[in-house]
Image: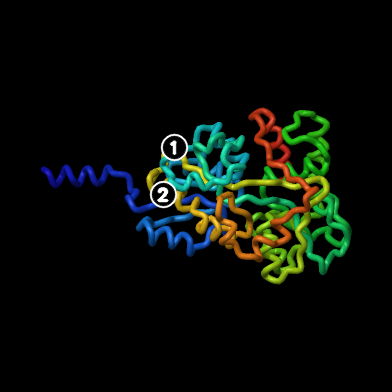
Amino acid sequence: MKRLLALTTLLATPAFAEGELKVYHWFEYIPQELVDKFTAETGITVTIDTYDSNEAMLASLKAGKLGQYDVAVPGDYMVEIMRGEGILGEYAPEEMPNFANIEPQWLDVPFDPGRKHSIPYQWGSTAFSVNRDVYQGDINSLGIIFNPPEELKGKINVLDSQGEVLALGSLYLGIPQCTTDREQLKALNDMLLAAKENWASFGSDIAKDVLVSGDAAAGMIYNGFSAKARAEGANVEYAFPKEGYVLWMDNMVLLKDAPNRDNAIKFMNFLLDPQNAAAVTNYAAYSPGVKGATEFLDAAIKDSPENNPPADQKGEFIIACDAETQALYDAIWTNLKK
């Protein structure tokens, strides 16, 4: 009877081992060596599944994957959306000895006041890069993407990322994000549809590769991907356009109903160690949000033009719209992707 009871208990236990961690992460965004280091230090086996946009990640979690993962890595505005929808777990700073390593400017952020659900992962910018072998003209405007010169028409890759495409489009037109003005929304919709005629592809995971291969001569891109393309031999220049660019911070969040919560906290604390945060930056080519990480950065990363915008050029965070306004932007995006 005891044996039967033990077997019944075993079968009723969820199939999550004590030594596991399940991570939902952006593609090509963490070095395997760092994951291996965490496993060597803790004995915890890490499984990583990937996504290519904030919106894809959210849709997947809401479609049934919440409860299957312990942590994810959403952008700033998506943290706010996820927090509002009640799909984030919560932790106390005392649970992470390295919490004190968070840089002050990233501690009390509007998308997660007081950092109750997330920690900084990496931050950077989104704009575009141009192959200088193909086009030698001025690249100081978002018009390169939305109203391109003849040399670039049909040779442009655009990120498959609703938040960034619509934010950059709004900057180009000089209209506010989350506008409810019907004329402004129509102008944004019409401009994007006209611009699409000059684009070769939509793709976030291919953004670097198409510039390296020459399949695209220009592309909307994350600054770190542009630096990687340049390091791989592409003669590309990353732009900080006069209209502005997207400033972002990716954050590791604790998910609601995380099956391995204690291991998730250990991993988040591990990533707040300066040397480990720098290892992510040296791999991804963005910027850390952790005190003391700078001394461990490669010079090529720390001094790269992609990580050092002109002092007079300012980035803007993507704004999380209210549900009613977001529905209007969703319609524009759906129309664009038809």
Q: Which residue is mark 2?
A: 266
Q: CA distance from mark 1 to mark 2?
A: 13 Å
Q: Is residue 210 above or below residue 310?
A: below
Residue pictured at 56% horizontal, 36% vertical: 112
Q: How is the image coloured?
A: rainbow
Label 2: how many Cα within 10 Å (few below 14, some 14–19, many 20+): some
Element type at mark 2: helix
Q: Position of residue 276 (x, y in %)?
A: 50, 57
Residue pictured at 76% horizontal, 45% vertical: 314
Amino acid beneath label 1? Ala
User: Would residue 1 be found to the left or right of residue 66 on screen?
Assistant: left
Residue pictured at 78% horizontal, 50% vertical: 311
Which label was assigned to residue 92?
1
Between 58 and 128, the residue placed more toward the observer is: 128
Q: Residue 4 falls in which quadrant of the image?
A: top left
Label 1: how many Cα within 10 Å (few below 14, some 14–19, many 20+): few
Q: Is residue 150 above or below residue 98?
A: below
Which label was assigned to residue 150?
none
Element type at mark 1: loop
